[in-house]
């Protein structure tokens, strides 16, 4: 009876649970420390998190340095142009293959964390927890100074962006007319309640702006939206 039940369960399980995803292999093109192109496929290294490209850190003497750029350069020195065999673990929200990658028989993610080039991404895996602790104790790489964890850096940037958006909204609260520039260069303003008002976004880099009155908008050369 057990054999029959087991056979039934296996027969009804989705194929994805029975067949492991094929390995991703090929020459490495380093995008940044934790994101590579391997054989043309975009791969996010599982279990590690490296500083963002624009991220800066502080050395022991208090001076700042571009640790995100440094992490990318260090990764290129170690792995650029070499051959990797990556075992998929998941797919992230950006469509990247999340995988463990072996290079020359060694776990690339573990090496990066152990050398202080990246952090253990404990939110997703504890595989490299001890490797990071060893790097921290020996002040290797990023651990030689003061560094904000990449996840905290990203969260701070999101919060700053949200705060800036709120400030813009508050500044324009008394000037609700949206001066939009169309794809053909036409300058059109939208009044609250008009058909396209809510979905119209203002981009100052394109010369778009807010107006406090229709008279102000017309004087600046904008015309009213027809709907």
Image: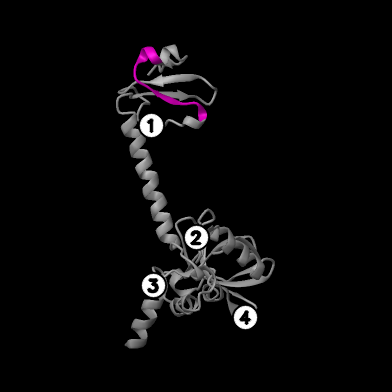
Label 3 to label 1: alpha-carbon separation: 46 Å
Query: Which residue position holds label 4?
Result: 105
Secondary structure beneath dot 3 equals: helix
Residue 112 appears in the figure: yes
Query: Which residue position holds label 3?
Result: 12
Closer to the chain start, of discs 4 and 2, is 2
Residue 27 appears in the figure: no
Closer to the chain start, of discs 1 and 2, is 2
Percent coordinates x, y for residue 176 in the rendering: 33, 24
Q: Residue at x 53, y 72 (%)?
A: 116
Of the pair 137 and 165, the residue shown nearer to us: 137
Q: Which mark lies nearer to you, 2 or 3?
A: 2
Q: Residue furthest right?
A: 81
Query: Which residue position holds label 1?
Result: 199
Range of magenta residues: 206-216
Query: Which residue position holds label 2?
Result: 57
Of the pair 114 and 45, the residue shown nearer to us: 114
Label 1 to label 4: alpha-carbon separation: 53 Å
């Amino acid at each position: 009876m057990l054999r029959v039940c087991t056979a039934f369960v296996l027969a009804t399980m989705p194929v994805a649970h029975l067949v492991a995803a094929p390995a991703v292999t090929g020459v490495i093109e380093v995008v940044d420390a934790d994101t590579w192109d391997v054989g043309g496929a975009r791969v996010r290294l599982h279990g590690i998190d490296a500083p963002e490209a624009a991220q800066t850190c502080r050395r022991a003497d208090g001076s700042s340095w571009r640790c995100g750029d440094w992490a990318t350069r260090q990764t290129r020195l170690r792995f650029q142009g070499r051959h990797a065999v990556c075992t998929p673990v998941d797919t992230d929200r950006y469509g990247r293959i999340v995988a463990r990658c072996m290079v020359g028989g060694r776990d690339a993610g573990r090496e990066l964390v152990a050398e202080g080039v990246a952090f253990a991404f404990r939110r997703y895996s504890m595989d490299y927890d001890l490797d990071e602790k060893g790097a921290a104790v020996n002040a290797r790489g990023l651990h030689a100074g003061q560094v904000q964890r990449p996840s905290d850096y990203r969260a701070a940037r999101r919060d700053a962006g949200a705060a800036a958006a709120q400030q813009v909204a508050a500044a324009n609260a008394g000037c609700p007319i949206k001066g939009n520039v169309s794809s053909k260069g036409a300058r059109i303003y939208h009044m609250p309640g008009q058909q396209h008002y809510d979905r119209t976004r203002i981009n100052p880099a394109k010369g778009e702006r807010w107006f406090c009155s229709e008279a102000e908008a017309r004087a600046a050369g904008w015309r009213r939206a027809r709907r």
